Image: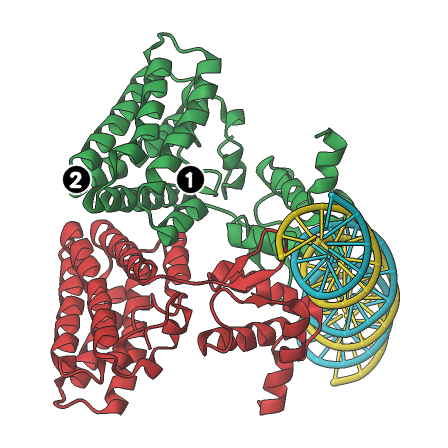
Chain colours: A red, B green, C yellow, D cyan
Amino acid sequence: MSERDAERSVSQTVRAQLALRDMILSGRLRPGERISELQAVDVTGVSRTPVRLALVRLEDEGLLQAIPSGGFMVKAFTERDILDSIELRGTLEGLAARFAAERGVSARSLEPLKECLADLDQLVRQDPISVEAFSAYVTMNARFHALLNELSASAPLIREIDRVSALPFASPSAFVMAQSALPEAHQILLIGQDHHRVVVDAIENREGARAEAVMREHSRLAARNLRLAIRNRTHLDLLPALALLKSPVE
Amino acid sequence: MSERDAERSVSQTVRAQLALRDMILSGRLRPGERISELQAVDVTGVSRTPVRLALVRLEDEGLLQAIPSGGFMVKAFTERDILDSIELRGTLEGLAARFAAERGVSARSLEPLKECLADLDQLVRQDPISVEAFSAYVTMNARFHALLNELSASAPLIREIDRVSALPFASPSAFVMAQSALPEAHQILLIGQDHHRVVVDAIENREGARAEAVMREHSRLAARNLRLAIRNRTHLDLLPALALLKSPVE
DNA sequence: GCCTATAGTACTGTATACACTCTGAACTCA
DNA sequence: TGAGTTCAGAGTGTATACAGTACTATAGGC
């Protein structure tokens, strides 16, 4: 499919949504700033109808906030909001792991997860870890978490996890790239990978409480990375999510 | 404000949303059935633009499902989906209670909760409990849960709890009315009220794990009520949420 | 000098028209 | 008889025009 076909096949609504999301995350639209529909029309080049739908979608994605008198503004988050969102994701992923462990999963459905685990092992084994390896880790890590959540076999739960993870600072890989600049990088990656290994083991042995606890703890690595990155002021440009902070750190 | 003014002050979008939601929950639109925009225009009496917005809102409320080729259909739920949604709500409310307990709340902010607790006590003390008392209990119970969640002081968490509770079968009061027809009614109510008492006590004493555990268990009363109501086939008309079940129980 | 009222402007809410796509059925050809 | 193709219909995606409302700035009065 050519690029022009691809452009044509995507609806105007989606195009507007992507453009606006990008503007928000890149910080071109500041937290608290109102987004006028006409302004959005100018920026995206599509008409008001799809722009409106895009704004509604971004609202329930959590990036925008409805103004009582009408219209939308860019949502502002506190550091606490971000940490809570991470804890929230950890809690939900913990529930997913517990469901998988308690209800039991077939050896067959555990296979892709174990393969993913092995791939991650290979990446983590490098020392020092190249930037490309970090990038590959982000992809693989997302895959691991997705597979894990699916093992819960619970559509409502998966739906909520996806929703929470859609926030740019709450996804499992949100701070991995920022972490790449830290001296503790390798160690943190090894710990995270051990969590992965433990949760698979717990699910296999139907240890629900253990599976849940380790996934909760796993998410707290992200919180730790966030704090380290902010404190060290390292590679803040790798963290577009921080553009949403009420009082910017830079 | 007169009724006509009230009708005028509500936007067409909201009116369409209410009308469509009512049709879904009352079972006039069956699970899996496609909702055409023009059909919705006929039913609601508003034009396509607000109808579309209403459909999008109902989709992310979880009542509708997008069809890949365009448009929406009524979502179908399994009994497992419903039970998982209840467990999900319990987990989130548990997290809220833990946050409140660990972070500490002022005696002042605990007051409204204790008043609510006392009001509920008075309702539960009756034996037998009148239908009016059951109805009052539903209102008071919703208030108690709302106050409790607010104590977490976590906007992202409250947002998700509200979202999950918006599903008609996942709200804290979803099955209370159905329960009113059961012989075990009074006993279940007493147990639930004891949970309320325990969680307040746990928060006051900053016992995070205890607060979390009791709220999780609390939600399982709803699951128990659901199973009882379905098994006994009692007052299924009081449970509009069951219209969303894939294979209806009646 | 400050507060209030009014007019203008900008923006959202809604309706509708048009274009394109997808689906289903009927007809034709092998 | 079956499969493929074409045509009709319905339905969604998009653009735009119009109406109503909220905000702002300016001018006048206290």
- Identify the amino acid type marked 1: Ala
Give the percent coordinates (x, y) of residue B141: 39, 28
- Closest to the observer, B248 or B27: B27
> Which residue in the protein does label 1 denote?
B170
Q: Residue at x 48, y 43 (%)?
A: B166
Spatial separation of the CA atoms under disc 2 and disc 1: 28 Å
Whether residues under marks 2 and 1 lie with C-beta atoms below 8 angstroms apart, the answer is no
Q: Which of the 4 image quadrants contains residue B120?
A: top left
Determine whether, in the image, residue A132 is placed left or right of residue A16: left
Chain under callout 1: B
Give the percent coordinates (x, y) of residue B213: 20, 39
**Could one spot residue B67 in this view of the protein?**
no
Q: Is residue A113 above or below residue A89?
A: below
Determine whether, in the image, residue B39 is placed left or right of residue B35: right
- Closest to the observer, B170 or A150: B170
Please tell me the numbered disc located at residue B206.
2
**Secondary structure state at the residue bearing disc 1:** loop
Q: Which of the 4 image quadrants contains residue A149?
A: bottom left
Q: Earlier in the sequence, mark 2 or mark 1?
A: 1
Please tell me the numbered disc located at residue A244.
none
**Viewport quadrant of the N terminus of chain B:** top right
Q: Residues within 10 Å of mark 1 (few under 14, many from 20)?
A: many
- Identify the amino acid type marked 2: Arg
Mark 2 or mark 1, which is nearer to you? 2
Give the percent coordinates (x, y) of residue A98: 22, 52
Let me know if marks 2 and 1 both belong to one chain. yes
- Closest to the observer, B229 or A174: A174
Q: Is residue A29 above or below residue A52?
A: below
Q: Residues within 10 Å of mark 2 (few under 14, many from 20)?
A: many
Chain under callout 2: B
**Could one spot residue B59 in this view of the protein?**
yes
